[in-house]
Amino acid sequence: MSAATLEAAKAPAAPAQPGAASARSGPYRPASWNRVGWLMVTPYLLVFALFVVYPVTYGFFLARHPESYVKLWADPIFANAVINSVLFLLVVVNLKFIIALFLSGFFTHEKRWIRWVSLLFILPWAVPSIPTILSFRFMLNPEWGIINSIIFKLTGADGPNWLNDRWIAFSMAGLVHIWKSLPFWTLILLTGRLAISKDLYEAASVDGATRWQQFVHITWPSIASLYLTCTILSMIWTLGDFNSVYLLTGGGPSDLTHVLATLGIRYLRLDQVDMAMATIVVAMPLILPLVYFMMKRLSKAPDET
């Protein structure tokens, strides 16, 4: 071995630059990959900016004037809309899920006729909203609707004015909302029930547990998290749903059945765009806590929910 080679072997190695080892520890990616990645993401960013960022920003811009909120608070229809929206969230949605919870137990039975009933049951959710809700409006017509016609033939008395009384009309809107969305949430809870092992029910039956005890100690603990998550998600969707009220009652009688979603449409029809945008902004204290709890639950691990 030559003297030059020995000197090179004895010489201390050059110190590695900071971050060099960590940079080589991962897979090597050419700089061109970053450009390709940005090119792939750019169409999504443009669509997001055009259809999300711009409308939201423009809406806040239109609702920037304090006078809009002063006029909104002075409008008595707004107070009724807030009350109706809260009732929809607390009463109608929870009633819907209580019914869906027990119907999901009914559809777990493995019988052929129950399967046929389940196909018919899911039709209200599958068909479009406009013709189905308008058909309810025609049936509830006090003069020539089929419901009042049947009441007159059976009793000889005139039926009630279903859509001319505030609370009856609001109840009918809630009933239509439940009828329309109940199949979807029943299907979700049914999926949760079917994921429970049948061995648990067989062991409980051997121990002499009743069906109610099986529900309390097996079914409910297994689907409680799913039930709560679906309830919160349904509240978020219901707050922005205007079909059930607007297509059935149009906000009537005398604008007493409006919810916040339909109240914004009313202001738009009156060419009061700032009031419509202010209505949406005022609804945010109701929807933001729901969105927060929903995202918090979705971000947890399965064993933490």
Image (cartoon, helix red, strand yellow):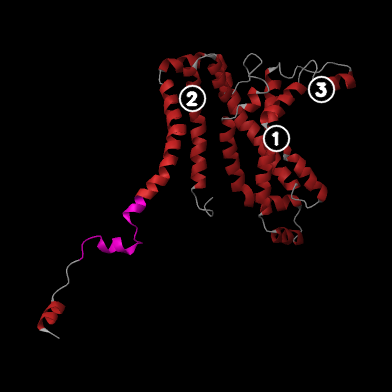
| In this view, the mark in front (3 or 2) | 3
Residue 173 seen? yes
The image shows residue 91, relative to residue 69, as above or below, that is below
| In this view, the mark in front (1 or 3) | 1
Of residues 22 and 77, the one nearer the viewer is 22
Instruction: State the image coordinates of residue 13 (x, y, percent, origin top left).
Output: 17, 72
Residue 63 seen? no
Q: What residue type is labelled 3?
A: Ile
Quadrant hosting residue 161: top right
Name the residue beneath numbered marker 1: 127
Q: What residue type is labelled 1?
A: Val
Q: Which of marks 3 and 2 is nearer the N terminus?
A: 3
Instruction: State the image coordinates of residue 4 (x, y, percent, origin top left).
Output: 11, 80
Q: What residue type is labelled 2?
A: Val
| Disc 2 secondary structure class | helix
- What is the crowding at mark 3: few (fewer than 14 residues within 10 Å), some, or many (at least 20)? some
The residue depicted at 14 percent of the width and 78 percent of the height is 10
Name the residue beneath numbered marker 2: 282
The residue depicted at 39 percent of the width and 45 percent of the height is 39
The region drawn magenta spans 16-34
User: Separation of disc 1 and disc 3 at Cα?
Assistant: 21 Å
Q: Residue 146 carries which label?
A: 3
- Most distant residue in the bottom direction: 1
Q: Which of marks 1 and 2 is nearer the N terminus?
A: 1
| In this view, the mark in front (1 or 2) | 1
The residue depicted at 51 percent of the width and 41 percent of the height is 293
